[in-house]
Amino acid sequence: MMAREEYSVVVEMDDDTPVIREELEFQNFSSGSGVGGKITQDKQPSSNNSGFNDTSFFETRTPQNAPQGGHPLWSIEYYAQYFDVDTEHVLTRAAKSLLPKDNFADVVGSNPDLYGPFWISTTLIFLLFVTSSIAGSIEAINDDQKQPNYDFTILYFGVIAIYTYTFGVSLFVWGALKYFGCRPSLLDTVGLYGYGLTIWVPISIICIVPLDLLRWVLVLVGFAISAFFITKNLYPVISRAEAKTSRLFLIFVLAAHAAFALLLKFEFFSYETKTESST
C-alpha cells in the first residue's frame, strides 16, 4: 500500500508538469504579444489638424486613378493620369490654400494632381498681363497721355517668372530634400507651390487700384498667407533632416518666397508712367 501510494503520487506530479509548462508557454506568448502591440502603437505617427506631425502627405504614393498596367515615363498617358481631376476638387484645394488652417494632406488625400498648379499659374500669368495693362492705361490717363503703351514683354516675363517659380523652384526644393534623405514627393511639392499661387489671383485684380500703399499691403498679405500655407505643409518633411539643416532650409524657402513676392510687386504691381515735360 505504501508503494502504491508513492507510485500514485509520482504519477500525479508527472501529470501536473505538462500543465505547468503549458501555462508558462501561454504566459510567454501573451507577454510577447503584449510587448509587440505596445511597440507598434508607439511607432504610429501622431497627427493633428495643423499638419506639422502628419508626414503621410509627402510619402511616395500612386494616384487612385492610375491605371493598373502603368505607362512609360516618356508617354503622354503617364502624365495624363495626374490631370484627370474634377474641377470641383481643384476649386476646393485652391480655396483651402486661401485659409490654410486645415492639413492639406487631408484635402488632397491619395489623389495629387498637376492640373491645379498648371491651371492656377497659367491663370495668374494672364491676369498679371491684363491687370497691368489696365492699370498702365489708368496711369497714362492720369498723366494726360493720349495713348497708353502696352508692354508685351510683361507677358513674356510673367511666363518665365511664374512657371519657373511654380515648377522650377519646387523641383529644386524636392531635389534638395531628396539629397538630405527627407523622402519628399515631387507631385506634392509641386502641388504646394502651385496651389500656393491662388492668393495672388485676387490680389492681381485689386492692385489695379492706383494706390501704391494698398498694393504694398496686398503684397504683404499675399506673402503671409502663401508662405504660411507652404511652410506649414512642408515643415513635416523638412524636419526629417538634421536640426541645423532643417532651419537653414526653412529660411531658404521663406527667402525664396519673399523674393518672389517682391518680384511681383516691382514688375507687375508698380504701374508708373513717365510724364513728358511740357515745353
Image (tube, helix red, strand yellow):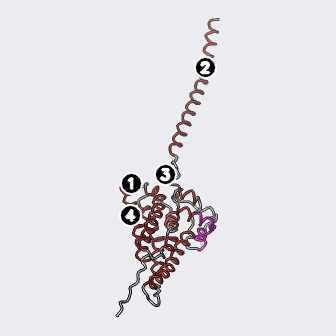
Whether residue 260 appears in this view of the structure is no
Query: In the figure, residue 109 lies in which quadrant?
Result: bottom right
Secondary structure type for disc 1: loop
> How many callouts does the rendering have?
4
At label 4, which amino acid type do we have?
Phe
Q: Earlier in the sequence, mark 1 or mark 3?
A: 3
Q: Which mark is residue 14?
A: 2
Identify which amino acid the numbered label 2 is placed on: Asp
Image position of 62 (left or right of 263) = right
* N-terminal-most mark, 4 or 3: 3
Q: Amino acid at mark 3?
A: Asn
Q: Which residues are magenta?
A: 76-92
Task: State which mark lies toward you, 2 or 4.
Answer: 4
User: Label 2 vs label 4: CA separation?
Assistant: 75 Å
Query: For residue 252, which numbered disc appears in the image?
Result: 4
Q: Which residue is mark 3?
A: 53
Q: Nearer the viewer, mark 1 or mark 4?
A: 4
- Cα separation, mark 2 vs mark 3, equals 57 Å
Q: Residues within 10 Å of mark 3 (few under 14, many from 20)?
A: some
Q: Secondary structure at mark 4?
A: helix
